[in-house]
Amino acid sequence: MEIRLAGTADRDAWRSLWYAYCADQGLNSSEQATDRIWRRIERPDEPINALIAVSATGVTIGFATFVIHPYTLSDRPVCFLADLYVDDSSRRQGIGQAMLTNLASYGRGQGWLRIYWNTDRSNYHARALYDKIGKLSPYLTYYFDL
């Protein structure tokens, strides 16, 4: 398996997985919004980027989108892991963990302070992985839609 930053040639494979991810989340991403996200991933001046996981047979089986931003308590940037998705047929094979390990290695090389993410409290499968590799924050996330 290869894990790497997404590039222009990955658009169609990422897009297919993106729609599967949105369906899993009960969300609907329009073509316009999906195209806008991909264009932002491709642009080096945007804070949004993505890793993709490609199987030994050349099939894209997962992605992680992330956003780099300043942090008020440090001069080092932080990374918000916005989305992590592995295709249903490839789950429970260590791909999610490998993607997070790869992202951490990349982040150390970029000088990030930390990586953080949110997950649904009821997402027990993902939380089993996250409990192994991360620390659970004591903070709750609140939001309101605009």
Image: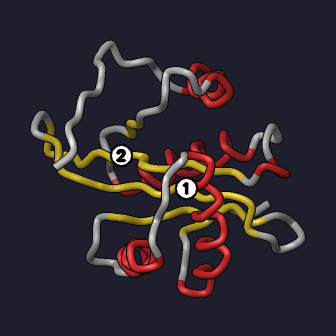
Residue 80 tag number: 2
In the image: residue 146, left or right of residue 17: left
Residue at image mark 1: 22
Residue drawn at x 73%, y 68% is 60
Residue drawn at x 66%, y 39% is 97
Secondary structure of the residue carrying numbered label 2:
strand
Q: Amino acid at mark 1?
A: Cys
Q: Quadrant of residue 16?
A: bottom right
In the rendered image, the vertical position of residue 37 relative to residue 85, given as above or below:
below
Asked whether the residues under the numbered discs 2 and 1 touch, taking CB atoms below 8 Å apart as contact, a structural biologist would say no
In the rendered image, the vertical position of residue 142 relative to residue 66, given as above or below:
above
Residue drawn at x 26%, y 77% is 45
Residue 141: image x %, image y %? 29, 27
The mark that comes first in sequence, 2 or 1, is 1
Residue 59: image x %, image y %? 80, 71
Crowding at dot 1, Cα within 10 Å, few <14 / some 14-19 / many 20+, comes out as: some
Crowding at dot 2, Cα within 10 Å, few <14 / some 14-19 / many 20+, comes out as: some
Residue drawn at x 58%, y 81% is 11
Q: Residue furthest right?
A: 57
Residue 124: image x %, image y %? 63, 22
Secondary structure of the residue carrying numbered label 1:
helix
Q: Amino acid at mark 2?
A: Phe
Looking at the rendered image, the disc whose residue lies closer to the viewer, 2 or 1, is 1
In the rendered image, the vertical position of residue 43 relative to residue 52, given as above or below:
below
